[in-house]
Image (cartoon, rainbow, N blue to C red):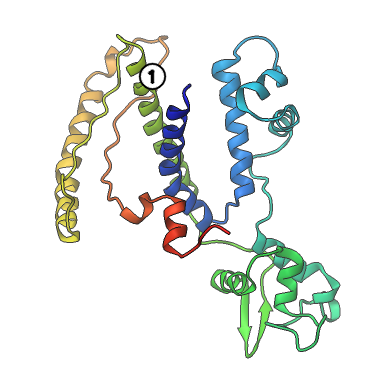
Amino acid sequence: MGQEVKDHLRHALSLMLKPLVRLLIAQGVTHAEFSETAKEVYVEIALRHFETEGKVNKSRVAILTGLTRKEAKNVVDRALTTDYKDKTHSRPARVLTGWYSDPAYQGPYGIPLELPYEGAEEGAPSFVALVKNYSGDMAPRQMLNQLLESGAVLQVDDRYKAVSRIFIHKKLSAPIVDRLGSVGYRFFSTAAKNIDADRESGKKTLFDRMVFADDGCTDEVIRMFSEYLSTRGQSFLEELDVWFSSRKDLNKPGVPRKETGVYMLHYVEEKDDLGSLRELLQERGVGQD
């Protein structure tokens, strides 16, 4: 693969990840957790599509994925022994754990102390000191705001009180999260298959079409389009549902089946989200040292 194609793929990956990473951060999924998940997917795909015969050769997997052999081994071992619900504690969770378990931040009977934001004396228990000990270089004020917003910490006069050992982001229901995964998989699966088909002449592509406003729309016209699409789009989907129902008998018993269907979605681009990290840093006045 040429470097130019790799550069374009990385740019495409960046665009695909932006809305997802925004959601991950909002729900407390750390970069470390994302990174471990990405490693697992790399190993799985390497085995499933590029190393399909014989025993698992960790050296070969390492070559295919760019992981070290040790990393590949760790991924394989973890997949065999660890439940997917296990996770690395986020920084807010680590701060709360320290607040509840470190004697320096506990009062009588192990009850967490109500902490001032900053200590009156050097070495005195304070929220700033707690964050420094358990969250490294994260800004204390930012950490405090997150804990206050989550309800894990309350402000009592000029001090802060821990009321929960658990840091919980705004909850999403499991069905919604599962739907996100299935929508993303199906969309990118079709797009990737069609890219492969373009490289191999004669290979049939799946339906992949788009219509959009040439010069964009105002919020009012977008609202009108949303209402129009809700009616006409629903009618079309119901027509497709009837099509499937009327052909159920054509599915022969004993013949393998695959899930198939059509997704319709209305997208609205936010121009700021399409810029690069470099452009954002320049806008914020960050220059090279």
Reply above or below: 134 against 27.
below
Q: Residue 4 is drawn in which quadrant?
A: top left
Mark 1 neighbour class, 10 Å CA radius: few under 14, some 14 to 19, many 20 or more: some
In percent of width and height, residue 106 lies at: 81, 77
In percent of width and height, residue 283 lies at: 41, 62
Q: Which residue is mark 1?
A: 196
In percent of width and height, residue 114 lies at: 72, 82
What amino acid type should be assigned to the residue bearing mark 1? Asp
Looking at the image, which residue is at 57% across and 31% down? 41
Q: Is residue 186 left or right of residue 146?
A: left
Q: Residue 244 is drawn in which quadrant?
A: top left
Q: Nearer the viewer, residue 289 or 240?
A: 289
Q: Is residue 272 left or right of residue 41?
A: left
Task: Tell me the quadrant of the picture where the C terminus can be found.
Answer: bottom right
Q: Is residue 41 left or right of residue 122?
A: left
Residue at the farthest front position: 289
Q: Is residue 1 left or right of residue 206?
A: right
In percent of width and height, residue 124 lies at: 81, 83
Label 1 SS: helix
